[in-house]
Image (cartoon, rainbow, N blue to C red):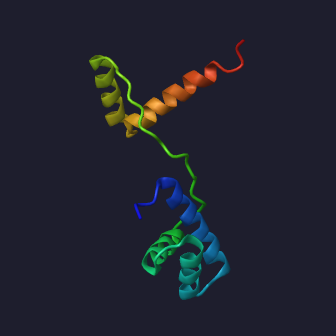
Amino acid sequence: MGRATAAQKAERLNHARQVLSRLEDLPDAVERMVQDCDLSPRQAYRYLRHARRLKAPVAVTEAKVAFTVKLSRTLVHRLRTYAASSGLTLSEIVSRAVETLVNRGRGRA
C-alpha cells in the first residue's frame, strides 16, 4: 500500500480528533482508528498524537494533478522570485491566479 494522500491524512486526522473526543483511553482510541481506517496500531497512534495538538479540524483539500504548461523564461523567473519572497509554492501561486481568472469569466454571456 502506498503513502496516504494529503486528503486522506486530513480525513484521518479529523477522524482521530472525533475519536479522542469520545474515548479517553488511548489504547481504545488506537483500536478504534485501526478498525475504522485500516491502519496499523503504530500509524493510528501517530494520527492520534498529532490530532491531540490540533485546535480545529484540518481542511480536506482536493487531490492535485500535474498539468504542464509552457511559459516564457522571464515569467518563470518572476514567478520564482515572487514565490521566494512570499513563501508560497509555484503551484499555489499559479492555482490562485488561474482560479481568479476563471472566476472572473463566470456570469458572462
Identify the residue at horizontal 27%, vertical 19% (top origin).
Answer: 73
Query: Within the image, what quadrant is residue 90 found in?
Result: top left
Identify the residue at horizontal 44%, vertical 74% (top origin).
Answer: 43
Judge from the rendering whether residue 81 lies leftward or rightward of residue 104; answer left or right.
left
Q: 55 above or below 93?
A: below
Of 37 and 78, the residue lying toward us:
37
Q: Position of residue 23 (x, y in %)?
A: 64, 82
Q: Quadrant of the N terminus?
A: bottom left
Q: Position of residue 39 (x, y in %)?
A: 49, 73
Identify the residue at horizontal 60%, vertical 68% (top origin).
Answer: 15
Q: Position of residue 3 (x, y in %)?
A: 41, 60
Judge from the rendering whether residue 84 lies leftward or rightward of residue 41; answer left or right.
left
Q: 88 above or below 106?
A: below
| Identity of the residue furthest to the top in this view | 109
Q: Quadrant of the C terminus?
A: top right
Q: Position of residue 35 (x, y in %)?
A: 58, 78
Q: In this figure, what is the number of numbered marks? A: 0
Judge from the rendering whether residue 83 lies leftward or rightward of residue 92; answer left or right.
left
Of 3 and 45, the residue lying toward us:
3
Q: 60 above or below 12?
A: above
Query: Within the image, what quadrant is residue 4 found in?
Result: bottom left
Identify the residue at horizontal 46%, vertical 77% (top origin).
Answer: 40
